[in-house]
């Protein structure tokens, strides 16, 4: 979800840009999809690289297994009675928690988009096999996002902050709006967007938990934030390992996507501006620019790990990464 009141400042181009040997992923079968047309077109390169996808999937799924938790354990009768202090939440904080729930509860739309793209019959057979592997991540990912919606719904109802009938009506209203993935025909940009999205969510949950004086909700947001950090790590690892021979190209894509980074739910949620205001007021330490900085720092660290021979990260508004 977009946690900012403004988009990042556009990255400026240098007067004499360095020469790049850019990895061209734009013709690869996109995520979610872009059918190939014609029989004479050369078979596009596979993206993600199957070997890299296997490595990153292993790390993510093993990590997710170890991080597993249940909403029923967090919001059980004992915790609600002895740990929860719902009276400490302000009206603005309560509204922010409800907005987080509405965003996490848009899963039917998320899953429908990704399933349609990753199972599209018009991609080459080799890409279809890679897409099938990617579904291992998608199913676990959306399952964890659904867990977030579930635990917040249980918390709001069991603490009496919102009546079950009212919350059901609110969730129904918000869920009826459509979700459209913003990079349906741009594979690399789509993965960069998802990396930024998951990192933004992680940083926001951390900032919101920091600002609250409600022990049980802090514990819930900490668990949710850890999940989001794990999701972001999946996309970071995938992008960086697929570009370890040319991290310059990846840095440029990150800058380009960041210039117009908006979460799709901005056009979904009712009275989004009002809800956004509650989000920002409830987590004052959250800064949207931190999302871009975090990803670019990850690329910089990768450049130090792999090779600095061809690494020239351009981000004037952030300054040198090694200073």
Image (spheres, rainbow, N blue to C red):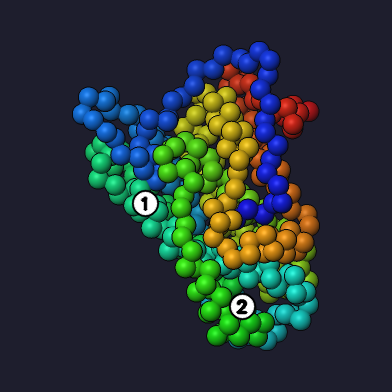
Task: State which quarter of the image contains the C terminus.
Answer: top right
Name the residue furthest left. Answer: 39
Q: Which quadrant of the structure image shows residue 155? A: bottom right
Q: Using the image, tell me which numbered label, if any, was put on residue 210.
A: none
Q: Is residue 133 visible from the viewing direction of this image?
A: no
Task: State which quarter of the image contains the N terminus.
Answer: bottom right
Residue in view at x 46 percent, y 49 percent: 181
Secondary structure under the numbered disc 2 in the rendered image: helix
Nearer to me, 158 or 267: 267
**Are there few (<14), some (14-19), or many (20+) residues within 10 Å of tag 2?**
many
Q: Is residue 52 visible from the viewing direction of this image?
A: yes
Residue in view at x 54 percent, y 53 percent: 264
Secondary structure under the numbered disc 1 in the rendered image: helix
- In the picture, measured across the screen, residue 230 lies left or right of residue 278, that is left
The x and y percentages for residue 69 are 53, 68
Q: Using the image, tell me which numbered label, if any, was put on residue 155.
A: 2
Instruction: Tell me which label, 2 or 1, sits earlier in the chain.
Output: 1
The x and y percentages for residue 51 are 38, 36
Identify the residue position indicated by label 1 in the image. Answer: 135
């Amino acid at each position: 979800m977009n946690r900012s009141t403004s988009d990042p400042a556009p990255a400026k181009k240098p007067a004499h840009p360095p020469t790049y040997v850019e990895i061209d992923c734009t013709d690869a079968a996109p995520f979610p999809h872009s059918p190939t047309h014609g029989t004479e077109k050369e078979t596009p390169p596979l993206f993600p690289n199957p070997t890299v996808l296997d490595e990153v999937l292993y790390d993510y799924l093993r990590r997710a297994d170890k991080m597993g938790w249940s909403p029923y354990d967090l919001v059980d009768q004992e915790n609600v009675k002895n740990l929860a202090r719902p009276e400490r939440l302000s009206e603005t904080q309560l509204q922010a928690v409800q907005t987080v729930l509405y965003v996490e509860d848009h899963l039917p739309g998320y899953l429908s988009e990704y399933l349609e793209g990753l199972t599209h019959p018009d991609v080459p057979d080799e890409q279809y096999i890679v897409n099938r592997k990617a579904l291992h991540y998608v199913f676990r990912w959306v399952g964890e996002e659904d867990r977030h919606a579930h635990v917040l719904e249980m918390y709001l109802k069991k603490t009496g902050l919102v009546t079950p009938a009212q919350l059901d009506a609110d969730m129904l209203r918000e869920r009826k709006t459509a979700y459209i993935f913003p990079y349906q025909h741009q594979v690399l940009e789509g993965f960069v967007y998802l990396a930024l999205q998951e990192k933004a969510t992680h940083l926001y949950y951390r900032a919101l938990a920091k600002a609250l004086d409600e022990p049980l909700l802090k514990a819930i947001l900490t668990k949710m934030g850890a999940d989001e950090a794990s999701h972001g790590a999946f996309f970071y690892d995938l992008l960086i390992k697929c570009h370890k021979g040319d991290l310059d190209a990846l840095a440029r894509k990150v800058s380009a996507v960041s210039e117009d980074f908006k979460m799709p739910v901005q056009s979904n949620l009712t009275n989004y501006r009002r809800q956004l205001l509650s989000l920002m007021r409830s987590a004052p330490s959250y800064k949207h620019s931190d999302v871009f900085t975090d990803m670019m720092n990850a690329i910089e660290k990768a450049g130090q790990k792999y090779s600095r021979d061809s690494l020239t990260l351009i981000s004037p508004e952030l300054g040198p990464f090694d200073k």
